[in-house]
Amino acid sequence: MIPGNFQYHAPTTLKQAVELLNQYGEEAKILAGGHSLLPMMKLRFAEPAHLIDINLVPGLKGISEKTGMIHIGAMTTENELIASELLQKKCPLIPEAARLIADPQVRNRGTIGGDVAHGDPGNDHPAVMLALGASLVLRGPKKERVVPVDGFYLGPLSTQIQADEILTEIRVPTPPPRSGYAYQKLKRKIGDFATAGAAVQLTLNNGACSQIGIALTNAGPTPIKLTAAEKLLTGKKLDEALIQKAAELAMAACDPAPDMRGPVEYKRHMVAEMTKRALKQAWSRAA
Ligand code: FAD
């Protein structure tokens, strides 16, 4: 339970942090809240030779809205998301999911950027970001690029972030009026990762779904966007039969691994159940 040797760096500007990443490449790791990275280092699953702590870098925290887009700094903690009046009012799906993450200690230090960048399919924010159609701002030594979260996850702990890039901001389109949301997470006990989770964000127009995003947590090697179910429900008024059909599409799209949270068949059924519950709750909140 003792990590390997590493050199600790505490840059005070984003430029310095990116330069350090560029200098040390694959040997370096960003340290944000440390609640995923440090356990992995203690277990020697990760042995970075250089740890680049970005807690002193200004400008990476905070939540604001500009021209129909919510901007969330990567170093914003889970508790800051939960306490945000702007998010409660304009995008309550994010604090709803944040409240279900871990325990108060983890939520005090853990950041949304770390949760999104880590690439663990058990993390809750990635599915939420897929349902919301978010994009990610990645800053490298030469340029900044903005990538959609759809397509960002490549495999377990593998994302599109290059070794010399830092996730600086998450951008979420502000949900329009008549929107509903839900995050349903089945877990064995308080503080546990999801056995299965489903995020839904939808908007109604004349009683039908004009826009819908649905995504799953811990249901495969990456978070899963339920594109087929989204297509099925777009333009329709939800009813029991359609919700059942969407849940079947969720079961078909997921690819869970057996572990201490249960065997594959059980997890598939829980994926279907979480999808149904999230759809019903989002629908009733929008209506
Ligand atoms: P760190 O641990 O510092 O970093 C994680 C990884 O992301 C590292 O590889 C790091 O280099 C990289 N990284 C971090 N920030 C950036 C950035 N800005 N740019 C580029 N790369 C970056 N999470 C859940 O979602 N749901 C849970 O139910 C849950 N339960 C937990 C229970 C326990 C007991 C613990 C200890 C953790 C749990 N977590 C859970 C994980 C927790 O939410 C972590 O805080 C989160 O996964 C990582 O955020 P962090 O800020 O701690 O990142």
Image (tube, rainbow, N blue to C red):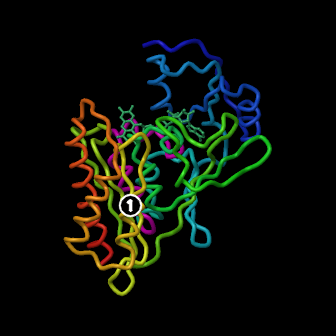
The answer to which of 281 and 228 lies nearer the viewer is: 228
Give the magenta-colored segment's residue range: 89-113
The answer to which of 286 and 104 lies nearer the viewer is: 286
Q: Main secondary structure of the magenta part?
A: helix
Residue plotted at (24% across, 61% down): 276
- Does the magenta segment cover residue 170? no
What x and y, as percent, mark residue 236?
33, 79
Q: Residues within 10 Å of mark 1 (few under 14, many from 20)?
A: many
The answer to which of 149 and 104 lies nearer the viewer is: 149
Which corner quadrant of the image does residue 83 belong to?
Answer: bottom left
What x and y, as percent, mark residue 180?
35, 70
The answer to which of 78 and 277 lies nearer the viewer is: 277
Residue at which label 1 appears: 214
Which corner quadrant of the image does residue 67 belong to?
Answer: bottom right
What x and y, as percent, mark residue 138?
66, 47
Residue plotted at (22% across, 64% down): 244
Which corner quadrant of the image does residue 113 belong to?
Answer: top right
Residue plotted at (76% across, 27% down): 23
Residue plotted at (44% across, 43% down): 222
Q: Is 255 drawn above or below residue 216 in the view shown? A: above
Type of the residue with mark 1: Ile
In terms of secondary structure, where does tag 1 sit? strand
The quadrant of the picture occupied by the N terminus is top left
Q: Is 230 drawn above or below residue 164 in the view shown? A: below
Q: Residue furthest bottom?
A: 206
Q: Is 130 drawn above or below residue 210 in the view shown? A: above
The quadrant of the picture occupied by the C terminus is bottom left
Q: Is residue 149 left or right of residue 245?
A: right
